[in-house]
Image: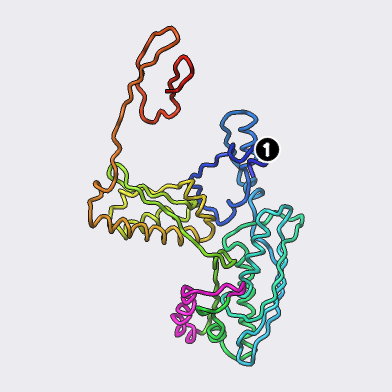
Amino acid sequence: MVADILKLPLEKVYVELAASGGAFGAKEELSIQGQTALAAFLLQRPVKTTLTRKQSTQHHVKRHPMTLSYKVGADADGHLLAVRVRIVGDTGGYAGTGGKCLLRAACHSCGVYRVPNVDVKSQAIFTNNPTSGAMRGFGSNQAQFAMEGVMDILAEKVGVDGWDIRMRNILNPGDAFATGQIMRESVSGMRVALESIKDIYKSAKYKGLGCGIKSTGIGNGAVEGGYLIIRVVDGPRLDVLNGYTEMGQGVFTTVRQAVYEETGLSPDLIDVRWDREVGSKAGEAWASRATTLSCAAAQRAGQKLAADLKELPLEKIGRPRIPRRICLRLHDAAGHSRSAEKSDHAHDFQLCGPTGDPR
């Protein structure tokens, strides 16, 4: 986006990630980056943009207001047979991530329940209201809140309570999600959670119950992956390269904990930082995706390192850097010479003879 604003090729724009504090989705939208980059480009000097609280409230996106219409079919026992949903989301004056948020609403419109027949239409509509965009849940919250209300109405019509109607329809491994994605074993957590509260729910006088699911293959049935590299460096220390954004959700801390648990090495020896190359494969950090996937990657990488530590101590695994100094003798056109020392980091230093031959 910045390259497009400045009319520059992509390779001329470099973005370096810093731990950026809480986000909850809003930082996924372009807010101050474009005008800040433009000012720096025009002035040819570093520029910092600081918003007042009022400006921040005006600039940053809001959660999509949605109008949702549900028509549900079920048998006499309350087993879902069909769900028809129409969703309209108010995306404000700019598109932003409105399309994706309404896509997530469509994907999660049937909640955690198995429905053999699904008909969903979801639209993001431009209005003159404040711009809406990515907030925690990314559009899935609104749809699942509506579906949970539908389940309570269905339970009342069938004559059972909220726990029974949900347990009869909950997704199991092998069932198809609303998108057609086949659920894996991890979806069993919903059934386990329901069973764990059964007695409390059944005996409570005042109660409410809601279920939810999120980030099932990014909502579209894609296969997820986590990426992380552990390097042993001088010290000896661990340099953990992570590709996900630290938004204040503690992903760097949880990665450090995962490596510590697998290796037993002190957390004081473990440094976690963002890496551009790993980040190019990692994808979005939204919701708890970054924490889940990066910790899984840290666990597996930590297990490999732990196996190595059984054979060699940490200081033997790393390759210590050997300081080197290079003495260069330079000759100018008049034949005078002088000596100069350069470190091995001087990759931009080149010697040329009178003919320009770099040898």
Whether 133 is drawn above or below 181: the answer is: above
Q: Residues within 10 Å of mark 1 (few under 14, many from 20)?
A: few
Residue 42 lies left or right of residue 264; in this view the side is: right
Q: Nearer the viewer, residue 176 or 246?
A: 176
Residue 15 or residue 252, whichever sits in front:
15
Image quarter of residue 114: bottom right
- Up the image or down, 209 lies above or below 266; here it is below
On the image, numbered disc 1 is attached to which residue?
Answer: 7
Amino acid under disc 1 = Lys
Q: In which image quadrant can residue 176 be found?
A: bottom right
Was residue 206 drawn as part of the magenta stretch in this picture? Answer: no
Magenta-highlighted residues: 177-204
Residue at x 35%, y 21% (from the top left corner): 341
Image point 39% across, 15% down: which residue? 330
Classified by dominant secondary structure, the portion drawn in magenta counts as helix
Q: What percent of the width, then of the height, locates residue 211?
A: 54, 75
Estimate the x, y position of residue 41 in percent, counting from the top left.
63, 32
